[in-house]
Image (spheres, rainbow, N blue to C red):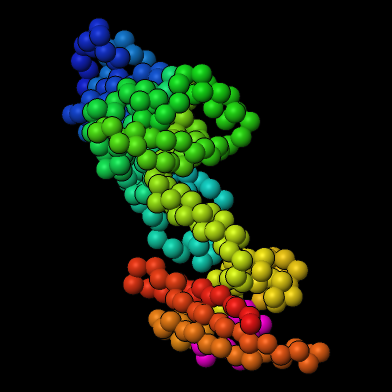
Amino acid sequence: MALWFKKRVEKARPEEPALRTGADTAVATEEKPMELAGTHVTVAPEMPDSSYAAALDAAAVSAPAPTLRAVEVKKEESLLKVTIADRSQAATPKTESFAAERPEVPRGDPRALYYQLMNGLYDVILVLDEDGHVIDCNVRSEQIFGYSPDDLWNMPIDKMVYGMNSRMFNLLKKNLGIKQHILIDARCFRSNGTSFLAEIGVSTIQLTRTGNVVFAIRNIERRKSGQEEVRKLRALLDLTPVPAFTCNTDGAFEMMNPPVLKALGIVDEMEAQKKRFADVMPDMIEQFQNALAGEEVNETRLITLPDGTAYKMELALRPIRKGREIAGVAGTMVTK
């Protein structure tokens, strides 16, 4: 690729570098090489011709795709010819493959992609500086905490996460030097004073020179409440003297209390969870299906043991409802 620039001589301004390009004037410095975006090159009288190649070569090295690696500068009368070689042309030819035939995916604005990712996450994302103050957040943070992005800016994290004072935050940072991620449970406070239980994933990211800590916060109030209810029901089930159990919709046992384990001759609950209702009571499959359909089943059967002993068993089955859906079956067995 060859670019032709008309060589013009102007007096360089003292506050600017001598080399400038185009109408938009991209300035070439040691920290920021010039970008080849202009329509001409302006050169100060005192700038030697060798500087053309040096500055343009720096611009070529830093230019976006296609990556440029070589710049050749030639003077032809009153014109300056700049030839830029594409790396793809200079590279050694490779055998064509299926991957080479795929169209190149255009690169988007990194900042736009960053916020697209941030705002697409379900969790609240808070990016903190080294002192534990919020420097960035996603849209989910306003939905959950009620703070606008402007309100969150420079807010200390302990205002939202209970107990996350400077001592605890520094301890987290120290542990992050050993582990890549840390998961903690904490109580979080909204702008209106209400609170919720949260699961917080803590990790690091390099957005600023000193590094940053990321809090990914998820409201687990409903999940924790459900787990607490299960623990209460489990304690109640273990205290019930009547053999009782629960099964999922596939008939697999999920919970069994000690009396039912004894009645069925099962050693422990771990072994029971490998069995299904049809394995221990094959003649009651129809009643189990009726309970799954929403019926309340009460059935009395005469059971004969291998030694010839007979007894009556009353089986009661009830559907376990979760909203409008049936999530399983609960049952009791009473022998007489």
In this rendering, does residue 81 appear at all? no
| Outermost residue to the left | 23
Residue 55, percent across and down?
Answer: 38, 24
Name the quadrant containing residue 59. Answer: top left
Above or below for 142 versus 293: above
The residue nearer to you, when weighing 184 against 215, is: 184
In this rendering, does residue 215 appear at all? yes
Residue occupying image coordinates x 56% and y 88%: 300
Residue occupying image coordinates x 49% and y 61%: 100
Above or below for 47 versus 85: above
Quadrant of the snapshot with the C terminus? bottom right
Badge count: 0
Residue occupying image coordinates x 52% and y 80%: 316
* Magenta-drawn stretch contains 192: no
The overriding secondary structure of the stretch rendered in magenta is helix
Magenta stretch, residue numbers? 276-287
Quadrant of the snapshot with the N terminus? top left
Residue 10, percent across and down?
Answer: 20, 15
The residue nearer to you, when weighing 72 against 247, is: 247
Name the quadrant containing residue 293. Answer: bottom left
* Magenta-drawn stretch contains 283: yes
Above or below for 2 versus 336: above
Residue occupying image coordinates x 50% and y 46%: 90
The residue nearer to you, when weighing 228 against 223, is: 228
Q: Is residue 263 left or right of residue 20?
A: right
Residue 77, percent across and down?
Answer: 28, 28
| Outermost residue to the right | 307
| Outermost residue to the front | 336
Residue 123, percent across and down?
Answer: 38, 45
Above or below for 166 versus 297: above
